[in-house]
Image (cartoon, rainbow, N blue to C red):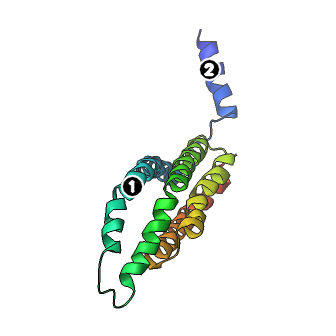
């Protein structure tokens, strides 16, 4: 009986299970939370844009647009309303791709890094293409891209631990 115990202990030392670094563990946990926020944020964004349609109609009736501010906002809001469904789909699919990538990196698999990168970059690029321009839309897309790049770099630091 003791021999079996000794042999099984010695076999486990020959094939040690790889340990996930603490930094990667923290990144993955924060990313799990971020994926959930992105998923529900995409849904919330869709419904909040749809709810703002009456505001757009009221803006059309405003007078005294001296600096073109209202007309610029109208153009941005029209574009956002037109692209509400594509933005919803991109947001949900991208958050699920990121979630899959994080799960794979949790298992120490390299494919997770690439999936996560695609899931992070896609919404930022879509923000530029579907955002309709305007200062707020462009600033949001730039911020999203910078945020995505920072997280990708943080995961790239741990790339050597992935198989």
Q: Position of residue 88 (x, y in %)?
A: 50, 51
For mark 2, does the 10 Å Cα neighbourhood hold few (<14), some (14 to 19), or many (20 or more) residues?
A: few
Q: Residue furthest bottom?
A: 66
Which of the two discs, 1 and 2, sits closer to the camera? 1
Q: How many marks?
A: 2
Describe residue 154's horizontal placement relative to residue 159 as left or right. left
Identify the residue at horizontal 62%, vertical 60% (top origin).
156
Front-most of residues 17 and 133: 133
Q: Of the numbered discs in the image, which one, if any, rests on residue 102?
A: none
Front-most of residues 13 and 140: 140
Q: Position of residue 29 (x, y in %)?
A: 45, 47
Describe residue 18's horizontal placement relative to residue 47 as left or right. right
Identify the residue at horizontal 29%, vertical 87% (top origin).
64
User: In which quadrant is the N terminus drawn?
Assistant: top right
User: In which quadrant is the C terminus drawn?
Assistant: top right
Q: Residue furthest top?
A: 1
Decide: is 12 above or below 82.
above
Identify the residue at horizontal 50%, vertical 75% (top origin).
138
Q: Position of residue 70 (x, y in %)?
A: 36, 80
Front-most of residues 13 and 132: 132
Decide: is 46 above or below 12.
below
Q: Of the numbered discs in the image, which one, if any, rests on residue 6?
A: 2
Describe residue 126's horizontal placement relative to residue 67 as left or right. right
Location of residue 2 (image quadrant): top right
Q: Position of residue 134 (x, y in %)?
A: 48, 78
Structural distance between the alpha carbons of marks 1 and 2: 66 Å
CB contact under 8 Å: marks 1 and 2: no
Circle 1 is placed at which residue position?
50
Q: Secondary structure at mark 1?
A: helix
Q: Earlier in the sequence, mark 1 or mark 2?
A: 2
Decide: is 13 above or below 83.
above
């Amino acid at each position: 009986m003791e021999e079996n115990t000794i042999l099984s202990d010695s076999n486990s030392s020959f094939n040690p299970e790889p340990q996930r670094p603490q930094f990667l563990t923290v990144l993955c946990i924060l990313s799990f939370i971020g994926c959930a926020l992105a998923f529900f944020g995409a849904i919330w964004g869709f419904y909040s844009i749809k709810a703002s349609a009456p505001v757009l109609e009221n803006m059309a009736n405003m007078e005294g647009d001296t600096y073109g501010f209202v007309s610029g906002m109208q153009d941005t809001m029209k574009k956002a309303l037109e692209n509400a469904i594509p933005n919803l789909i991109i947001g949900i699919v991208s958050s699920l791709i990121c979630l899959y990538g994080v799960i794979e990196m949790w298992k120490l698999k390299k494919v997770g890094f690439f999936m996560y990168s695609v899931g992070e970059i896609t919404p930022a690029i879509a923000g530029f293409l579907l955002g309709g321009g305007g200062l707020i839309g462009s600033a949001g897309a730039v911020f999203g891209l910078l945020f995505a790049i920072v997280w990708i770099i943080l995961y790239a630091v741990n790339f050597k631990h992935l198989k």
